[in-house]
Amino acid sequence: MAELLEWLARGLVDEPDAVRVETEQREDAIVFHLYVAPDDVGKVIGKQGRLARALRSVVRAGGARAEERYVLEIAG
């Protein structure tokens, strides 16, 4: 899932080399931290948060398929 998320984010930003995804295991979920360049945060979030919502939906769907709870956090 982290690789897919990174691939999707690289297609959205101006600085694809700055994109990285870190995974954190919590008690109740696996959290994916998406890091992008500060100038690209708005591009990943999208107008009215539409892109962020879409990315979170993809992550949640992957979690449902793996029978886990996946969460996406976007950091700049």
Image (cartoon, grey):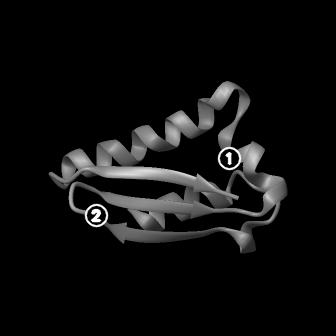
> Looking at the figure, which quarter contains the N terminus?
bottom left
* Rendered location of residue 73, percent (x, y): 51, 52
Residue at the disc numbered 1: 44
Mark 1 element type: helix
* Rendered location of residue 44, percent (x, y): 68, 46
Q: Nearer the observer, disc 2 or disc 1?
A: 2
Q: Quadrant of residue 17?
A: bottom right
Residue at the image point whose x is 51% and y is 36% from the top: 54
Relative to 26, is 32 on the left or the right?
right
* Rendered location of residue 34, percent (x, y): 56, 60
The numbered disc on residue 26 is 2
Relative to 18, is 24 on the left or the right?
left
Determine the CA span between mark 2 and mark 1.
24 Å
Residue at the image point whose x is 22% and y is 45% from the top: 64
Residue at the image point whose x is 55% and y is 64% from the top: 6
Q: Residue furthest left?
A: 67
Mark 2 element type: loop
